[in-house]
Amino acid sequence: MNKGIHFRFSLPLEGFNLAAKGEIPGQGVTALFGRSGSGKSSLLRCIAGLAQPVQAYLQFNGTVWHDSERGLFVPPQQRGIGYVFQEGVLFPHLSVRDNLLFGFNRTPKTEQIESLQRVVELLGLNALLKRYPVQLSGGEKQRVAIGRALLNNPRLLLMDEPMASLDRAHKKEIIPYLECLHRSISIPIIYVTHDPEELVRIADHLILIEAGRLTAQGALAEMMARVDLPIARDYDAGAIISARIIEHDEDFHLTRVEFSGGELTIAAVDQPVGSAIRIRIHAKDVSLALDAPGPTSILNILPAKVTEMQAHGRGRMVIRLDVGGVPVLARITQKSQHRLGLVPGSKVYAQIKSVALLA
């Protein structure tokens, strides 16, 4: 069976045409990332069957859902899709429990994969079950909306900027649940966002969209380390690294982790030794030296090799480094690059000022 999602759509939109062709893995979270109005939600609606493209081809795990050339179109209600909108749309006259059970009770028992109790625990909804939507915060409504979509036992979950209407505090409240969701369910998730923080916390795979065109797509870690993409110009640009906890330093409240490029010391992590974690190293927090520095307050200094360089803005450079086979970005000035004589192949020491824990 041809696993994954294969699509090709052409759809006129206001100001431009959506002309999108790509593939999405059959598991994990794929983020559709781009500016507001770039066509992300329109692509999601095409996949859901809620839009009618001029030309369309859509195959899900070997089953064709839409083929305009053959006149084939599987209606949305027959695709087995869960859809979470920008605002948690709940039935106001039903309690949280009854909202959750609305789709579940209509699913044949042989197709019921998720249980109410598991979804309630996964999304932290137990204390909310007797409440009504009017009694919920924005973040709580979205968690209930996600739970209801999961209890419809979908084969594919589509999430259209589910945190767009939330303030920063409520976003921080819901992100841990989305991370848990990411790790706990086996169906593919397509997640629309224009927020880089959501992107790096939740996604495995990334598709960049600009004016209706897919400009790049691939594994998140590789995409975030590309110097030729617009995301490398963002203030918060940085590489994502998978690591493993090897030691806790209780005296100084630090944790030591290892990855294929070496070891890093980070702020204490409340997880056992051996746990797998994801970390992010921002390009702005990496400086470069030609020689190993002497005594310094910087705890993480790793040998690296320059592989690519690109000018970004006035007087700035983004440098891609190879650290033991793992890509890391550094943002420095063009003057520093010139003074150090950096070219692809140069050997340097990457001085990493801070490391952010992702999950």
Image: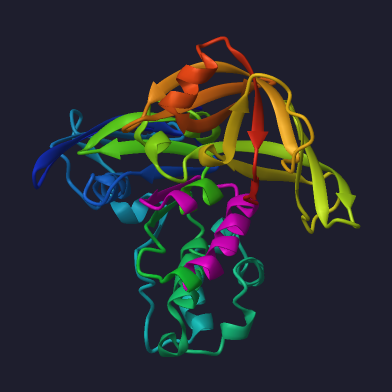
Q: Nearer the viewer, residue 291 or 242?
A: 291
Relative image position of residue 263 (x, y in whole percent) = 78, 34
Q: Which residues are magenta?
A: 170-197
Q: Nearer the viewer, residue 61 or 231?
A: 231
Q: Is residue 189 magenta?
A: yes
Relative image position of residue 50 (x, y in whole percent) = 24, 53
Quick check: 348 above or below 180? above
Relative image position of residue 186 (x, y in whole percent) = 59, 47
Q: Residue at x 87, y 50 (%)?
A: 248
Q: Nearer the viewer, residue 202 or 61?
A: 202
* Residue 301 location, quadrant: top right
Q: Residue at x 38, y 37 (%)?
A: 233
Q: Residue at x 75, y 40 (%)?
A: 299
Magenta residues, dominant SS class: helix
Can residue 65 be seen in the rendering of this structure?
A: no
Q: Nearer the viewer, residue 322 or 86?
A: 322
Q: Residue at x 63, y 80 (%)?
A: 126
Residue extending furthest top?
A: 345
Quick check: 256 above or below 124? above
